[in-house]
Every structure is written in structure tokens, then in C-alpha cells.
Amino acid sequence: MAKPMNEPVRILAVSREFTALRPLRSLAESHAWQIESAASAWDAMERVQSGSDPHALVLDLPRGDGDALHILRWLGRTRPDLPVIVICFPEDSEREREATCLGAREVLVRPLDEARLELAIKRHLGSSDPGHADLDSQDIEPVGPSAFFIGAGPVSQKLRTQAELLAESDVPVLIRGEAGSGRETLARLIHKLSVRSGFPFLKVNCSDMPAELLDAELFGNGANPEHGSSRTIAGKFERADKGTIFLDGIAEMPLSLQAKLMRVLQDKLLYYPGSERAHPVDVRVLAASSANLERALAERRLREDLYYRLTAFSVQVPPLRQRKAEIEIFLRHMMHKVARHFGLPPREFSASALDACRHYSWPGNLTELETFVKRYLVAGDKDFVLGGVELDFGDGRADLAPTPEPETIRMGAHPPTATHSFPTSLKSYIQSVKWEAEKKAIGSALQKTGWNRKAAARLLQVSYRTLLYKIDQYHMSASDPVLAPFPAARTSYRGAVDKVSGKK
């Protein structure tokens, strides 16, 4: 909610134990903020409904209270402009994701750090945010936590019109497009425009895990005494009831699971293993793939009945090189988003940088653009790299003449391949050697651990978040034959599968 000038900041704090919010009270004293306290989510809802008009709400999630997040659903309908900052315990990672999906602007983990809390509150207080005007643009439409659909050009406006039409129906949709082009963003837009928008939107990457774990992730497992399981674990289909499930990489789904998916699509029933009882499911399926589905069909990697059911309604997301009119808006919006994430002031793009970006083909699409923006935020024109080529702005412009054809070059954040020209400087050559060594080390660790990314992070002695960033940065996938898990490593998943399925 935008705060008028000279009006004191009013914050509604929701917590059972107000000693946990001592940093907030300290900040209120130093900034002359007005703090109003509520002991529960119900109490806070009553205050807002009776006329309390806070500029921000701080919600402290207690352990074991499954109803505390219902205020986010309610505020999403009645006060979508009210920024909510959630505080949770470190072990509540699942609720952290749920809070973000329900509209929380930021989630902080205990112990509460005063500096981080201050930055979070100031970031969401409205017009003082440097990216606020950017987010209010009619061309930028929020579709989820930190996700926005940008429809500034005719290509994207046509895509949004297609999304509106698809949102009116309630049938499966296939979203096609290159890697990093924004398939998930379009799926979120369709969900937002549909009647299911008030219910969950859950994503599953079908190429990200082995068949048994993917089976448990999608369909869950029922209580099965024969296998030592005494409790039911819900899968994504059950948890997304009345909402939407987004299946990315549908062509990489094992055939056995494609058959189960077809059964769910046809019967709208979920059958647990070892149980005769069917569980009704009401979920809309949006599937996506960057692969050649016709080839997958010919090679019998994709079921014919599933292919025809999904392709009845299909939409193509255009690559970034076909959306030149939006490059500058994408760059500026991404700069504000990245700067807010790192708590830094956004950097303005020079005229030479913008001109170079408009003429670049962006083979990695939005993923590559975000990586470039992170580099530019830190270094600006001093370390300007596009397509593995370091550009010199000494004369005020970028000389693109010596570079290879746009389709054969990659972002500076990715190691050069054999199709690239030789680096234009010793610095870029050394950097390319470093990237190649880093990618090999990561690939080796992932193979040894059977693509158990947490185990690989421990092996490499880096944080889990850093490893996920690097995997995305290098476009690494378990479906790549070169990076496929070693056969012996697959058994390392057994313990995880047993844990998911409840086996002893």
C-alpha cells in the first residue's frame, strides 16, 4: 500500500509471543513507526475489517498452527495491496513456500535480524521503492511470487489474449517454447485469469528426479501395511485440489507415469498403491516442454493418447529474440527485481549497453537476460560481456562487428562451447577455463550422488542455494546423457523414496 507523504507508518504485528518481535519495536522507536498488535490471525482480520488501515502487516508464524496462513488468502481477496512480511522457523521451509504462493511479499527466518527486517519493511512501503513505478506499469502484470508477465509489444499482447481465451476453458493445455522463454510465467498467467485463481498453483519438473520419486511427488502414496506404511502422504495432485498443476518437461516423464497421468485426466480419480479406494481430484493440468514432441512421439518416449489430449489446446511462447520491443522493459524490470533481492540500489543501463542488448539474440532467453542483469548490477560497463565476448565501451559504443553470428553465442555467465570464437582477451580466456572446470566439478559431484543436489552441495562444500544457481546457470540436467547419474548412484535414492512412501 502506498503511504502518503508525512504520514506516520502504521504496522500491524501478528504474534503470539511479542518478545519475538522485539527488533520490530526497536525499529518503531527509531523510525517513529506506529505498531498495533494482534494476538492471532483472526484478531488481525477483525481489526482490518473494522477500519484499521495499516501500511504493512508482519505475521509471525507459530509452530504447529496450520490455520495461521488463512489470513493471506483473505487479504488476497480483500486487501491485495497490503504488503505482508512473514516470519517463520528454519524448519518450516514447506510453510515458507506456501506463504510465498499465497501472496506474502517476503519471508524472513528466525532468529529475526533487525537490519533485514528494516530493509524488508522499507522495501514494501510503496513510493519510496525505486522499482515501484516499474511495477505499476500497465505492461507489467504480477502473476505470482516474484513472477511478472510483461506484455509491452504486439507479440506478447497476442500471447496474453491467447492466455485469456485458454483461461476461460477448463481443459489441459500444452505450452511450448524454448528453455528460459517464460513457459511457467504463461502457465501462472492462465491460472491467475481462470476461476481456479483462488486455489493452489503447484509446479513439478518432470525431468528433475527419478521415476519413483516423481511418482511419489505427483501422486503421493496411500497407507499400505504390506510395505510398512501406516499413513497417507499427499502428492501434488491431491494438494492442488481445485487449483492448477504445472508439469514442466512433460516429454521427460517416464512412460509408466504417463499412463497414471492419463488415468487421472480421464477418470479424475487418484488410486493409491495397494488400496482399492479412489480419491477424487479436481485439478487442471498445464503441461510444458521445450523438446520436439513429435520426435518423442515417433521414438515412443511419449504416449500417443497423452500427446493428443495435451495438444488439443496448445500455445507457443515466443523466444526473446522475437520480442525486441520489450528488451528494454525486461532489462529495467529485471534490474529493479534483482536489486531489491540483493538490497542494492538499481543501476541505470548506459545507452551503449541498451543498444548492444537490443541487437543481441539472447539464445538463453529470459534466464540468460537475468544472469546478465546480475553481472551488470555489480560491474556495469566495466565488465560488459555478451555471448562470451567482452565488449569495449572505451569509445562510447560497443563494437559488435567481430563477434560470431548471434545464434552461436552464449551469455558470458556460461562456458564457451566449440562453436564460439576464441575469447577476445586473456581475461575472458582465463574466465572460460574457470567456468569449464567449475561445470565439470559440479557434473562429477551430481553424478556421484545420483543427482541428489543436497548431497552434491555437501560434497562440493557449497550452500544448497549456490549449487541450484550454478545448475541453472550452466543449464545442467539429469536428462543429459553426459551428466546422467552413475548406475550405482541410483541406489542412493532408495532411502529417500522409502522415506516418501513411508517404508521402514
Image (cartoon, grey):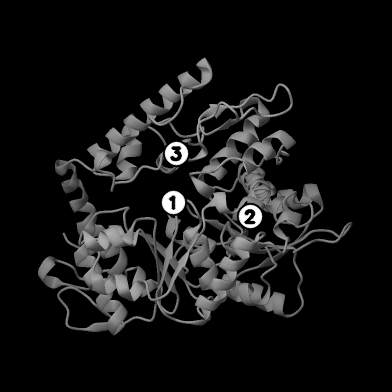
Residue with the most extreme top position: 426
Q: Position of residue 475 (x, y in %)?
A: 40, 43
Q: Nearer the viewer, mark 3 or mark 2?
A: 3
Q: How packed is label 2: few (under 14 Cα within 10 Å), some, or many (20 or more)?
A: some
At a point 28% along the width and 68% down the height, the residue shown is 220
Q: Quadrant of the C terminus?
A: bottom left
Quadrant of res 81: bottom right
Pointer 1 or 2: first along the chain: 2
Is 253 on the left-hand or right-hand side of 340? Answer: left
Q: Relative to 298, does residue 483 appear above or below in the rendering?
A: above
Is 80 on the left-hand or right-hand side of 9? Answer: left
At a point 61% along the width and 27% down the height, the residue shown is 391
Q: Quadrant of the N terminus?
A: bottom right
In three-dimensional space, the C-alpha distance between marks 3 and 1, rounded to whole angstroms, equals 21 Å
At a point 51% along the width and 72% down the height, the residue shown is 191
Is 300 on the left-hand or right-hand side of 118? Answer: left
Q: Mark 2 falls on what kind of element?
A: helix
Identify the amino acid type marked 3.
Thr
The reply to whether residue 175 is visible in this rendering is: yes
Q: Position of residue 237 (x, y in %)?
A: 35, 72
Q: Mark 1 falls on what kind of element?
A: loop
Numbered badge on residue 179: 1
Q: Relative to 260, does residue 299 appear above or below in the rendering?
A: above
Q: How packed is label 3: few (under 14 Cα within 10 Å), some, or many (20 or more)?
A: few
Pointer 3 or 2: first along the chain: 2
Q: Which residue is mark 2?
A: 21
